[in-house]
Amino acid sequence: MQKLVIVTFVLRALGFVLVLLSLFGHDLILNVFPGLEGMSINPIFYSGIGVYFVGALIYFFVNKKRRADRRREEIAEAEQRALQSSARGQDQDGGQDA
C-alpha cells in the first residue's frame, strides 16, 4: 500500500513538472524535441494535467481505503478496551459483594 502512495506522489509531481514545462519551458521543449518547432505545445500541457489527475484520483481512493481501515481498527480497539474495563468492573464488584 505504501508503494502505491509513493507512486501517486511521483505521478502528481511529474504532472506538475509537465505543466510548468509547457508554460515556461518552450525553448527547452523545442531543444529536446526539435520536431515540434512550429507546432503547438498544448499536448504536453494536457498530458501534465492528465498525469496529475490520474495520480490524484488513485491517491484519493487509496487514502479513502486507508482511513476506513484505520477507523475499523480504532473501533475494534475501543470495543476491546470497553470489554476489558467491564470485565474488570465485574470482577471488582463480585469481590466486594462476597
Image (cartoon, helix red, strand yellow):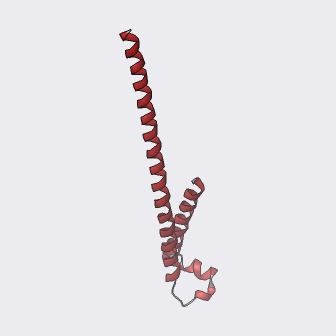
State whether residue 46 is above or below residue 39: above
- The residue at 45%/55% (across/down) is 64
Which residue lies most toward the bottom here? 38
Q: Position of residue 52 (x, y in %)?
A: 50, 68
Of residues 29 and 98, which is closer to you in this image? Answer: 98
- The residue at 40%/25% (across/down) is 86
Can you say which quadrant of the picture contains the N terminus? bottom right
Q: In the shown orientation, is residue 13 left or right of residue 92?
A: right
**Among the 4 quarters of the image, the one containing residue 35:** bottom right
State whether residue 53 is above or below residue 97: below
Q: Position of residue 43 (x, y in %)?
A: 52, 82
Can you say which quadrant of the picture contains the C terminus? top left
Of residues 14 and 72, which is closer to you in this image? Answer: 72
Q: Position of residue 75 (x, y in %)?
A: 42, 41
Which residue lies most toward the top here? 98
Q: In the shown orientation, is residue 40 left or right of residue 35?
A: left
Of residues 35 and 8, which is closer to you in this image? Answer: 8
Count up the numbered dots.
0
Q: In the shown orientation, is residue 96 left or right of residue 12?
A: left
Q: Position of residue 13 (x, y in %)?
A: 53, 64
**Among the 4 quarters of the image, the one containing residue 4:** bottom right
- The residue at 44%/31% (across/down) is 81
- The residue at 55%/57% (across/down) is 5
